[in-house]
Amino acid sequence: MAYSVKKHIQQLIYLLKIHSFTDVVVCPGSRNMPIVESMCCGDFNVHRALDERSAGFMTLGLAQTGRKVAVCVTSGSAVANLLPALVEAQYQGIGMAVITADRPKEMIGQMMGQTMWQTSALASAVKYSVDVEDDETADGMWFANREINAALNIAYAGQKGPVQINMQIKEPFFECTVETLPECRKISLIEDDVLFGSSMQQLWEESKRPLVMFGQYDGINPSYIDAFIRLGVPFYTEVLSNIEYFASHVETHGRACQTNNNRIPDNDIERYNPDFVIYIGGHIVSKVAKAAITKIKPQTVVRVSKSMEFADTFKCMTHLFVDPRRDDGNRVFGNGQVSEKNIGFKDSCTVSTTTKYPLVYGEFLNHIAPSSQIFLANSTTVRAIDYAYWNMPEAQAKRPRFFCNRGVNGIEGSMSAAIGYAGGVGNSPVYLVIGDLSFFYDVSSLWSVADTNLRILLVNDGKGSIFTKLAMKQTEAVKNYVAESHDFKAEGICESYRIDYKRVEDGDIPSTIWEWYFSETPGARLLEVTV
């Protein structure tokens, strides 16, 4: 016997082994034949069952002995026969892996034999379900690896339960001639109850060039900031992480945290070449930063998450730590000693001397009051503010707090979200920096703005400027139908919605205009700057 030539099946078998599965229950069938053949190569204790309903309960019984067990069935109604045992496993809290062979998705619903929507058939009885395509491209293999790893971890994390791995298998599929399984990536859970428990300490001590990457603030434990500064570790961070804001509430040995002392710009990450990355928080905006880590593929990449979500942003995650205490300020380190790492790389980092965006963004940050609350629209706006902020120590010292709809990064709703926030914080001014397309898209939200203290800075360059920065030809079609070039202004809109309004042409903003914009006089106002 030998392993299947199908590479996603090879990954499945390897990962079952490396995640310590010892037993498999198999049923007869043709579509699952290459999986069964591969399972019978001496890697597992193989148990036979004639019908799938019985196989499910056999797997349940084996799992109750404390072993990690998988059951493998063919496609079609065979899958549905597992449901009674999976419901029982779900309510008993018993972990197991359900391997269902399937036809390619393009065959489903086409009156082909033994085809049905197999993942939805078991959805009510499994903790997690993944559909793995028979796709041997680099992205296909990465996706299969990530999702199989996720399923095998989730089955035994927290409240245990069954998970489904649905393996689409294209014809021909009967060839099993591979003698040795190729190794592939294992993603491991860090199961310590603190971030720097014994597992992380060992990874830390083995590293030479660690890097911490903070994404958008998502309920992060503020003590992480303090912890990594104590350890001398370099950071990559953006304004949406708000670590400067939260650092103002944390002190280390009597000194306030100064995160920018350790910050590495995105264009220096590749030169730094980290071997150990800890990624905390939500989305990272910079494509340069994400591309650098994806290219480097550090030996260890730890994702610190608030849930069992295997977000493999850089396609090289090796560990997941689920933080059960997102707001506990005292539980970062375990009982052991964690050594400092004084890398010294920061001194040689690139310092920007060029102006990448219109000056209005820097002027805005220069005028804001300390601890201001700032909403940012997506695309150019969030990038421009981030660029200006990290080149302005005086703005960083004010520790403003930033918000942005980066969960999905859409154009819609930036103004609505800012208006909602402004309506919930009383008399405090809330600032919205927004581009013209995002503004006009969401203009109906201004119905509710008059009674708030929202200050809108509309930077209007007459187009979706992000599309002029992308690597696409600036044809008439792109100009008119993608970038949506226009000559609209906001004055009439502001009159309709009773918003105090001023416009400045060509980005030259007198100090009197800034005084009006930042005045504490109640009521909404909008400053439109054409650039």
Image (spheres, rainbow, N blue to C red):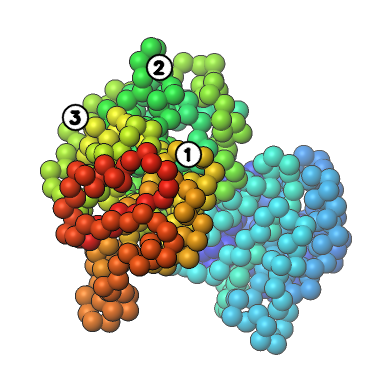
Residue at 39 percent of width and 12 percent of height: 253
- At label 3, counting other C-alpha atoms closer than 10 Å, the crowd grade (few under 14, some 14-19, many 20 or more) is few
Circle number at residue 252: 2
Is residue 403 among what the camera can see? no
Is residue 504 rendered to the left or right of residue 37? left
Q: Earlier in the sequence, mark 3 or mark 1?
A: 3
The residues tagged by marks 1 and 2 sit, at their Cα atoms, a distance apart of 33 Å
Q: Of tags 2 and 3, which is closer to the observer?
A: 2
- Identify residue for label 3: 347
Residue at 70 percent of width and 73 percent of height: 117
Q: Which structural element holds mark 2?
A: strand
Q: Is disc 3 in contact with disc 1, using a CB cutoff of under 8 Å?
A: no
- Identify residue for label 1: 427
- At label 1, counting other C-alpha atoms closer than 10 Å, the crowd grade (few under 14, some 14-19, many 20 or more) is some
Residue 65: name its quadrant.
top right
**Residue type of the residue flagged with mark 1:** Asn
Q: Of tags 1 and 2, which is closer to the observer?
A: 1
